[in-house]
Image (spheres, grey):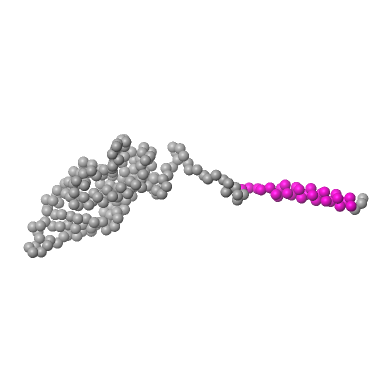
Amino acid sequence: MPSQFLIVIFAVIAAFVLFQLYNVLGKKVGRQPQDDAKAPPALPATGPDAPLRTPGVDATLLAAAASLRARDPAFDPAKFIDGARQAYETIVRGYAAGDRAALKPLLTPAVLDSFETGIAARETRGETEQVEFLHPPRADLELASAEGDRAVAKVRFLAELRSKIMPPADEATPGAPAEPRIEERRTAEHWTFERSLGASDPNWVLARVEPANA
């Protein structure tokens, strides 16, 4: 057989082998880097069983508020906590000052009666009190739920307070100003707020005060 003919046969065989290798090795196998770039972004879960999410809101707050948000989707736990902290400071200062006008719209009738008793007793003693917060109070939402037609939210407050209590004027030494009594204390309390669901008035009122663990 002529040598030129053998060379042609070997060339054809080599071309066939290279073609088969290309078919096997030249194909892309598995997930390629560019596939990630082309993949559509994952969408958040939706539907009644999907977890509630609010951008920028701590997951603990959302978990505590899940029950209420099921009835009132507009309830914003972060905004509620900000408002509850402001109400806490206003109520504590109002009680110390005996400011009944400031307290009335923030308390249920039962709590207002209890506060009124304490204010009246202080007035009977002839004392006046001023209170200041040594640090911004800490507020933690522990539960927010719907009970019938009421929204109920339980908040734990931790605070450090300084009270300046002025004694009755008749106890002052003649020619000398009365010396105030200074008291510093830490408080840990559960405050329960409530409001009517679906009412035109969106404001919460304080319904109960209980001691809490620090």
| Residue at 28% across, 52% down | 188
- Which residue is depicted at the point 26% across and 56% down? 133
Instruction: Find out whether residue 24 is within the magenta segment.
Output: yes
Number of marks in picture: 0
Residue 124 image point, x, y percent: 11, 50
In the image, residue 192 lies at what x, y percent? 28, 44
The location of residue 199, given as percent across then percent down, is 29, 36
Residue most toward the left?
Answer: 174
Residue at 21% from the left image edge and 41% from the top image edge: 109
Q: Pick whichever, 45 or 184, lies toward us.
A: 45
Span of residues in magenta: 4-31
Q: Is residue 146 above or below residue 127?
A: above
Q: What secondary structure is the magenta-colored segment mainly?
A: helix
Picture residue at 80% right of the left edge, 51% below the top? 14
Q: Is residue 46 left or right of residue 93?
A: right
Residue 37 is at least partly visible in this image: yes
Residue 212 seen in render: no
The image quarter in which residue 144 lies:
top left
